[in-house]
Amino acid sequence: MIVHRLTPCLLQGLLTLCGMHDLEGKPILLCSSNDSSVHLFDLPSFSEKGKIFAKQEIRAIQTGPGGLFFTGDGTGQVRVWNSVAVPTATT
Ligand SMILES: *[C@@H]1O[C@H](CO)[C@@H](O)[C@H](O)[C@H]1NC(C)=O
């Protein structure tokens, strides 16, 4: 097995990571940071695809079927996200 070393993502206070495929079958990486956001990265390019925000830091990310993923934040709120609805970063 060959492990490629990719550009590291440098975020503040990383809490958890989760890799998944979006509904188009493309691999993406979800990284939650302690600024209450989750950054979405395209793989293997590592370009940032988008960002989602919660009320408090997202401590857990879990993938579900059909491009869904779930996040749990510090308020105890569990949210369901659809990777299709991920906004494309325009900056
Ligand atoms: C996030 O973590 C960094 C590094 O540990 C820390 O410096 C920063 O104060 C934290 N931010 C919040 C909002 O907790």
Image: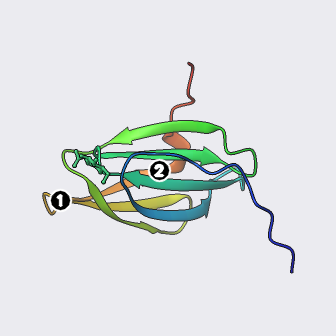
On the image, numbered disc 2 is attached to which residue?
A: 82
Whichever of callouts 1 and 2 sits on the residue coming sooner in the sequence is 1
Select label 1 or label 2 by which is in front: 1
Amino acid type of the residue that numbered disc 1 sits on in the rendered structure: Gly
Single out the residue that lies furthest toward the left.
75
Question: How far across and down, in percent of the image, does residue 44 sit?
Answer: 75, 51
Amino acid type of the residue that numbered disc 2 sits on in the rendered structure: Asn
Quarter in which the C terminus is drawn: top right
Q: Is residue 19 above or below residue 53?
A: below
Query: Which residue is pictured at 58% across the width and 64% down the height?
Result: 19
On the image, numbered disc 1 is attached to which residue?
A: 74
Q: How many marks?
A: 2
Single out the residue that lies furthest toward the top.
91
**In the figure, is residue 44 to the left or right of 85?**
right
**Crowd band around label 1 with a 10 angstrom C-alpha radius: few (<14), some (14–19), many (20+):** some
Query: Which residue is pictured at 26% across the width and 45% down the height?
Result: 54
Single out the residue that lies furthest toward the bottom.
1
Mark-to-mark CA distance, 1 and 2: 21 Å
Q: Image quadrant of residue 76?
A: bottom left
Secondary structure found at label 1: loop
